[in-house]
Every structure is written in structure tokens, then in C-alpha cells.
Amino acid sequence: MTNILISLFIKDKDNIKHAKVRNAYGILGGIIGILCNVFLFAGKFFAGIITGAISITADAFNNLSDAASSIITLAGFYMAGKPADEDHPFGHGRMEYVSGLIVALAILLMGVELLKSSASKILHPEPITFQMISIVILVVSILVKFWMALFNRKIGEKIQSETMKATATDSLNDCISTTAVLGGMLIFRFFGYNLDGFIGIFVACFVLWGGFEAVKDTMNPLLGETPDPELVKNIEEMVLRHKMVMGVHDMIVHDYGPGRRIVSLHAEVPANIDILEAHDMIDHIEMRLMQEYHCEATIHMDPVVTDDEETLKTKQRVEELIHTYDETLSIHDFRMVTGKTHTNVIFDMVIPYGKEYHVKQIVKDIREMIHREMPNQHFAVIKVDRSMVV
């Protein structure tokens, strides 16, 4: 069914890197979500009225909130597809994350309301009645929600959309909560125990947990999460495949919405090569990054001395000393300035995340160690970096 819907309503369905095709997937998911959830709300609300079960009514309003969430998701994909303009030069891609956050907050709000209603039903129990039509409605709801979970998961993975993946998770959670409601009705039918309020609380807790997970998934890219390590590795390997590039550092990946990345990095090249040749190579690498990873790339060239034996030996010795202090530390942009009375060794030092060093103290320690352990009055000029990738 999923493949049939995709083939019917999405032109050029395999060209998912194109913004219009990607938005078409999101819009299809939003429309399907609205139609299915409105249908389920109507059925469950009817079942809740005829049985008097708060758990069924709670589950019905859970579907209504899902329908509202689908409307927001639909609007988010539409706005995210708008091109860049004067006020938003990086486009509107992050609107997809914003819409996902609104969806998550709506889920949390609904969960709180369901929790209150269910607690009230426990404190002030009301009689419920068993109706076979309600069982049929609940079974159909489980089957529909399970298909929606598969549908949204497939689209989410295909277009790499956290919003669609969150919607898929919510649909799967709905299957579990509706199964609990169904179980409660069957227990009432065959054993006479009225667990309506307790199951309502279970459903509410499920809704709240799903909302919390959705908030986390959508807040991270908005706040600026660490880029995918696999993407970082692939970019580094691609840049280093060019024979003139000796090293890569200071990489930063900015995410302005799915498929809208801006990457900057420093590429180390031999200092004695022709600058026009090096510039042509850098242009080529930036173009390759756009073609292979669909990201705007800016590469800064760092010249590295490769033909001065004294510089190379000094760098090696400095690295050895720093690794005796902490083997996880690394350096780059190393250079020497030799004077009549002393020699300055200048470099950037990278402190990994998780190392709670006080910057001034570690710089002081390293400078004193270099000055003490190396001959001929070596003084260190150190700039401290924090890695923006893992």
C-alpha cells in the first residue's frame, strides 16, 4: 500500500535529494496522517460515548491530537520548502524541526489532560458497558495505526526526516496504548473488573513519554547537535584522498534543515607547492563535496612546512611532550619563528570534549614543560581549540 501511494502521488519519487520531491513525501505523509487520525477519532469517540469508557475517549482524543500534529507537520514541510530569501539566506529548512517541536509539545499537552481525566475516573468511578462494536473499532484502530507506523517510518528513513520518524514512533505507541484499552474492555467483559481509569493513566503515560522523546529528537538539531560521525568520517576521507592534502582539522558542520548543510574545514597542504595549483585543488574538493554530500563547503588552506628538518623534529618533540601530559590532546598549524635569543613554537592545541581542563592552566603547564624540556630557549605560543565534530 505504501509503495502504491508513493507511486501515485509523488513524481520522480527516487530523486529524494531534490527539495520539491522531499517536500512531496512530507506532504503525502501529512495528508495520510490527517485522514486516518480523523477517521479513528470519530470511531473511538463514538465507542467511548456508547460504553462510557474514559480510556476509549482518551484514546480518541489522542488520535485527534495526532491529526492536529499532522496538520502542523504538513505546514512545516510546506514552509521548509520555501526558497532562500533576503531575510533567510540559508532557506527555511529548520521550519521542519520547528513544526516537529510544536507536534511534540501538543502531544505533551494532550498527555497531561488525559492523565488528569483518568485520575478523576479512578477517584470518582463511573459504570461502563460492553459493546461489541467498540471491540471492532479498537481492533481496526490497532491495524490502521500499525500500518501508519510502517508508512511514516519508511518515508522518514527514505528522506531522513526526524519529524516523520517521530510520527512513526507515535503511531507505534498508539498501537500499544489502544491494545491496552482493548485488553481493559475484554477484562471487564469476561472478569467484571473495571480498570478503565487505570488503563487511561497508562495511555496518558505512553502519550507523555512519546511527547518527551519527540521533543528531544526535534530540539537537538535546533540547538546545534554534533553532526553524524559517519558523515564527518566520509568528508575527511574524501578530502584526504587528494594527494596534496596532508591533514584535515577544524571541521564545522552547520545544519539549516534536512539537505541544507554548510561545511567549513581546514586542509593542510605543503607550503612549497604552487598556490594556484593548490587553489584549483581546493575548488575541486568543494565541488565534490557538493555533488556527493549536498553541502556548501568552504575550505581554508593551511600551509605546512615539509622540507625543513629542524621544524619537523621540533614538531615531533612537541607532540611527544604534549602526549606525556595527555595522549588525547592533538596539535595542528605548527610553525617556528627563530630569533637570536629564543625560538617561538606556535601551534593550535585541540582539547577533546569530556576533558574538563581549565584553559589558562593547561596552556601554562604545556608552555612551562616545553620551555623546560627543550633546549635553546623554546617558548610556546598556544591557541586552544575545541573540536566541533566527533
Image (tube, helix red, strand yellow):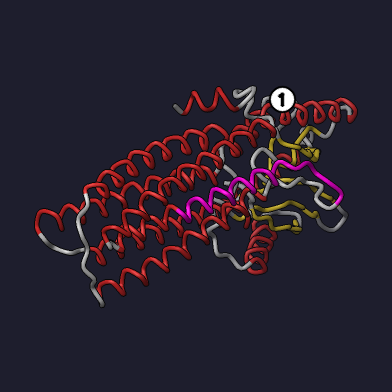
Q: How many marks?
A: 1
- Depth check: 30 or 206 in front? 30
Look at the numbered disc 1 and give the secondary structure of its residue.
loop
| Residue furthest to the left | 191
Identify whether 263 is placed above or below 178. above
Q: Residue at x 55, y 64 (%)?
A: 356
**In this rendering, does residue 318 appear at all?**
no
Q: Give the x, y percent position of residue 368.
A: 67, 64
236 vs 357: above or below: above
Residue sitting nearer the eye, 16 or 221: 16
Which is nearer the eye, 223 or 251? 223
Q: Amino acid at mark 1?
A: His
Residue for point 60% across, 39% down: 27
- Count neighbours of disc 1 (C-alpha within 10 A) and say few if under 14, some if 14 to 19, many if 20 or more: few
The percent position of residue 385, horizontal first and vertical second, equals 68, 55
* Closer to us: 44 or 120: 44
Image side of residue 98 versus residue 295, left or right: left
Give the residues drawn in magenta, as a range: 64-86
> Is 188 contained in the magenta span?
no
Q: Residue at label 1? A: 242
Residue 177 x/y as whole percent: 32, 53
- Residue 266 vs residue 104: left or right? right
